[in-house]
Image: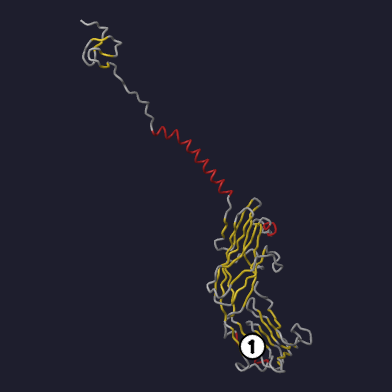
Amino acid sequence: MPDKTFVSCPHCGSQLHPDASFCPYCARTVNERQELSPPALSWRRALRRALPILAVLLLLAAAGTGWYLSTRPQVYDDGGTGEVIYTDEDGTYQILLGWRNTPYEPAPVITQTAEQDEEYTFPVCLFIHHKDTGANAGGIFLRKVASVTAEFDTPDDPSGYIAYDPPAYDDYAPDAALTSFTHFLGRENSARGTWTITMDNGDVILLHQTLNVDLIETVDIYPEDAPMDTIEDLQTLVDSIEDQVGDHDVVNLHLPAVTYEGGLSITGRPVNLYGNTEGEGRTVFTGSVQVNPKINNGVNYLYDLDLWGAETGWASPPPSGPGPSAAPSPAGAPP
């Protein structure tokens, strides 16, 4: 009987000492090796452990990106409204392009009427206000501005120029931060202008304004075209013109060398009066000439007339000699 303290070789069955690791009979190892694996970690548990770390990393990344973007120069485009609301460390400002008489209303689109190939000029104003109070902030704001430029794109009809003067302060509009006088040629035309305000901190403010030019007809009426030898004939002609031409057309009456006895009233639409300049005879009015057209912003021009009427506004004797004498309506010229 073999000693129970001995163990059998797992390969050949020979009796071996319990501590033996090698069988001398079959020359093979008798110890069984077991591979040990680390305990498996559930992927859900791993994800739960990683989520707080990922959240912190994402929060730090977002904060860093926000800080980086907040310190970079920004572009503020009005989107075609003619107005930008701009905020910095000193407050919030309303910045707009508009007319002198309406400083809080942006004018993104302007339509001007013009005679063919005539040259025109009108002002455009840059207004800057404190957004909360509406108070003028032009002086304060301009101290933080590096440059202001104004430029039109190429007009639809390049042969008809449309151009800004460099923006600058002008007494024409004392409440405006800057004013640019816009020049254009009388052509059916359109162009988009852009004011670029570059701040000291690198921010850029873009204000856009479109100018449309509509042509108007010029109607010249001479003594051979219509009766105008008496004040009654002339008044009848002036009164009838309103139904014969468009509201924005220019009407020029070329008067004969006669003396008109009585007053003339221009209250319908603007009419320009040209006195006679040929020969020695002149056009004389002994009565009043009242100019008050009902069309808003209407302007009448009186050229080469001798005005002896008591209600003309001129002292006696009246102006004489060549050269125009303009009489604008109370509405005045466009802003």
Quadrant in the picture for the N terminus: top left
The percent coordinates of residue 5 (x first, y second) are 27, 7
Whether 321 is drawn above or below 96: the answer is: below
The residue carrying mark 1 is: 253
For the residue pair 206 and 262, the one nearer the viewer reads as 206
In the foreground, 290 or 257: 257
Residue at point 46%, 36% (across, down): 51
Residue at (64%, 76%) from the top-left corner?
297
Question: What's the residue type where badge 1 is placed?
Answer: Leu
Residue 302 percent across, percent down from the top left: 69, 84
Which corner quadrant of the image does residue 185 belong to? bottom right
Placement of the C terminus among the 4 image quadrants: bottom right
| Horizontal relation, residue 139 to residue 45: left or right | right
Residue found at the very far right of the displayed protein: 316
Mark 1 Cα-neighbour bin, 10 Å: few <14, some 14–19, many ≥20:
many
Of the pair 329 and 191, the residue shown nearer to us? 191
Q: Secondary structure at mark 1?
A: strand
Q: Quadrant of residue 79?
A: bottom right
Q: What kind of colouring is applied to the model shown? A: secondary structure
